[in-house]
Amino acid sequence: MYNQEGFGGGGHAKSLRRREGKSFMRGNGNQGYQAQAEYIARMQDYTSAFAREKGRAPRCFVRTYGCQQNAADSEKLLGLLCQMGYAPIGEQHDADLILFNTCAVREHAEDRVFGNVGALKGVKKRNPELVIGLCGCMMQQESAAQKIRDSFPYVDLVFGTHALHRLPEFLWKKVSGKKRVFDLTGEGEELVEGIPLRREGSLKAGLPILYGCNNFCSYCIVPYVRGRERSRDPQVILEEARGLVEQGVKEIMLLGQNVNSYAGAGGVDFAELLRQVNGLPGDFRIRFMSSHPKDMTERVIDTIAQCPKVCNHIHLPVQSGNDRVLAAMNRKYDTARYRELIAYARKRIPDVVFTSDLIVGFPGETYEEFLDTLALIKEVRYSALFTFIYSRRSGTKAAELPDPVPYEEKSAWLRELLAAQEEISMGINTALIGSTCTVLVEEKSEKPGRLLGRNEGNIITEFAGEESLIGQFVRVKVTAAHNWAVEGELA
Ligand code: SAM
Ligand code: SF4
Ligand code: F3S
């Protein structure tokens, strides 16, 4: 189970999308990746000269702060850096370039970035040639970028989500003498394809199918920093998936803020895309994240039921179990429709497992309304929850609502929720004892001679086995349960 990691309060400035300040370069969002070829060539000359002088390639470190989309963006940043001649390293110590790919979803995520950037001051003092860059969702907000510009003078590069593919251009400007490079491209949300990727890990891969979000849930900053929905071409997605399977990837996670609103070329919707990815040859399984309940359909559920490679696991974030709160959140479904979807999936998909995201303490939420959420989780019985205390995001609709309940009280509600969820997870895992499940073996456990993997329902499974099984699907008979995992033996 995942505990909350963010909390509300604080606030930033007004305009989230327009960057007119003259200190910011007006970015050209229509420049595709091809336009970067010239800068890549110049950077390759730069890194070759660096290597001749120092006897090694320049080292880069990229840190991901956010969700799977953010992690997928980091794979592109690393791909571009490798193409330019940088050598990636796993920690910031000894790096010649440090790039933080930031997240803005909750205040806590932003505080972590500011804290970690603050800690780089001394590092830069000791090594003035170090290049420090910040990019990602947080940097797409003018207020955060201004704060970096004014209070962290040793940060060299700042660019937002829409300008990611222009990293070669920004880096070239920096290494060829520009003191600082700030680009915050408000527009230019076009789809940029063809960026090389460098993936971490070989067994599981995230595969973005659409970017951006159109939903404007009233609490959420994502639509402001990620722009409107753009679906990738289904052929490009299929080719990427095929390539991943050929490279040995065993689990593909189709990614989008709302995969159910995927609208690909040729009228391919999400159900059809699932069917086509399922049809690719090879021994692999498919997950997807996230599904917005307003766009989840019986057709998608039928497709999950019919496609053997698609896991029997649905992450269906409900956010609240109270209809007034759901309406105030602008979620565009009610609990009756949500229950209908759960019931239909239970009927169509044997052993289906549900997980969800929940927000506690939305502005104006009362304890009685919170109790509706508690009742819903007891009814649906999710195997795991991602729970968050509401965090005020400046510029969103909810930020303007009165929010009288103190943080301590919201924390108490969250503890109540987590206690109930622990019991539910324990119950679900205990019910698995005696059954046999298919597990993708991912790594060694900390306990000698034991391995860790996840079953189809994404439940962590530990069992005794040879290391050579890592990367394979095995059948495991469940023998014991905890609230965060099950244990078993090879069947
Ligand atoms: N697009 C996904 C969806 O609608 O389910 C969610 C993406 S968001 C990155 C992940 C989760 O963060 C949301 O489901 C929500 O629970 C939580 N979240 C978003 N904004 C929040 C806020 N202002 N305060 C607390 N939690 C928030
Ligand atoms: Fe945020 Fe809602 Fe979009 Fe999810 S669907 S990213 S919660 S606005
Ligand atoms: Fe993801 Fe954070 Fe951006 S959750 S979309 S990295 S604001």
Image: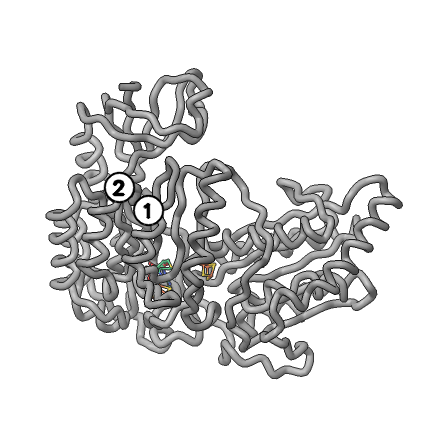
Quadrant of image for the C terminus: top left
Side of 159 where 243 appears, left or right? left
Q: What is the distance, in whole Å, between disc 2 and disc 1 at their CAs?
A: 7 Å
Residue under the image location 57 percent in, 54 percent down: 76
**Residue 63, image x, y percentages:** 58, 50
Residue labelled 2 has its Cβ within 8 Å of some atom of ligand 1: no
Q: Is residue 316 visible?
A: yes
Q: Which secondary structure, mark 1?
A: helix
> Which one is in front, 310 or 134?
310
Q: Residues within 10 Å of mark 1 (few under 14, many from 20)?
A: many
Residue drawn at (43%, 58%) of the image: 235
Q: Which mark is residue 308?
A: 2
Contact? badges 2 and 1 (CB < 8 Å): yes
Front residue of 440 and 173: 440
Q: Amino acid at mark 1?
A: Asn
Q: Earlier in the sequence, mark 2 or mark 1?
A: 1
User: What kind of residue is marked 2?
Assistant: Pro
Look at mark 1 in the image and give the residue it sits on: 278
Spot occupied by residue 89 in the image (x, y as percentages of width and height): 66, 41
Horizontal side, residue 184 vs residue 389: left or right: right
- Please state if 252 lies on the left or on the right of 103 as rendered: left
Residue 93's disc is: none
